Structure formats: structure tokens, C-alpha cells
Amino acid sequence: MSNFWMDAEGRRRFLSEKHVAVIAVARDGAATLAVPVWYRLDESGDLLVWTERGTIKERLVRASGRLSLLVQDENPPYRYVSAEGPATIVDTHKRRNSST
């Protein structure tokens, strides 16, 4: 039987590769929302997830302050990393000033 366990350095290397992640966020009165997202592992080891303002996933993360994330490679040998915990919303939207 193969060992699919990754140590911390293996997880960092895996998360630094290009993969699509699946974010999961709890919803009151409905099934958990699970949708694909782009992510990036920053220099400090935090996972950054992109979403548009006003989307259901952004509103749910903002309301709950938590999320789960699964990053996988479905090619053999199958590998994945899952993470869950508190979420911080950072608004990176920059307004453009027009001079008229």
C-alpha cells in the first residue's frame, strides 16, 4: 500500500504548484456550498483565495468567518491537501479615478 501522507515541506511544494481548489462554506438551511476557486500560497504560508465581491461564496465566508479548502491533483499518484480555519477578507479592489 502506498503512503499518501505529506510532510510540511511536501504540502508547501504541492500548494505552490498550479492547481484549482474547491472552497466549502457552510450555509444555514441549505447544503454546504462547494465551488472551484483559484488560490495562491503566499510567502508566510497563508492560502489566498480570489473571488468577486458580492458572490454567494464571498458573502458566506464574510458571514461565517471560516472556510474549508481542498486542493487536489487527480493524476496518478493522486495527491491532495485540505485545510480549514478562520478566514480574513481583504478587499483588493482598486478604484480608478477618471479625470474629465
Image (tube, rainbow, N blue to C red):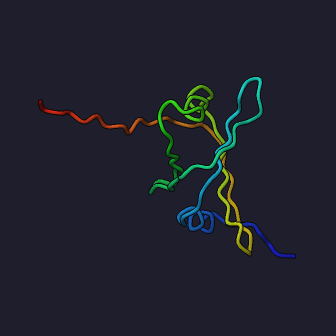
Q: Is residue 90 left or right of residue 96?
A: right
Q: Position of residue 52 (x, y in %)?
A: 48, 38
* Above or below, comparing residue 49 to residue 57 in the picture: below
**Position of the N terminus by quadrant:** bottom right
Q: Nearer the viewer, residue 93 or 5?
A: 93
Give the residue drawn at x 54%, y 64%: 18
* Above or below, comparing residue 84 to residue 11 in the picture: above
Give the residue drawn at x 62%, y 68%: 10
Q: Nearer the viewer, residue 84 or 58?
A: 58
Q: Is residue 95 left or right of residue 12?
A: left
Give the residue drawn at x 64%, y 39%: 67
Q: Position of residue 71 (x, y in %)?
A: 65, 57
Quarter of the image for residue 77 reads: bottom right
Q: How many marks on residues?
A: 0
Q: Position of residue 84 (x, y in %)?
A: 66, 44
Q: Nearer the viewer, residue 53 or 63?
A: 53
Give the residue drawn at x 50%, y 30%: 54
Quarter of the image for residue 20 reads: bottom right
**Position of the C terminus by quadrant:** top left
Q: Is residue 58 left or right of residue 80?
A: left
**In the current view of this chain or complex, which residue is farthest to the left?**
100
**In the current view of this chain or complex, which residue is farthest to the front?**
100
**In the current view of this chain or complex, which residue is farthest to the right?**
1
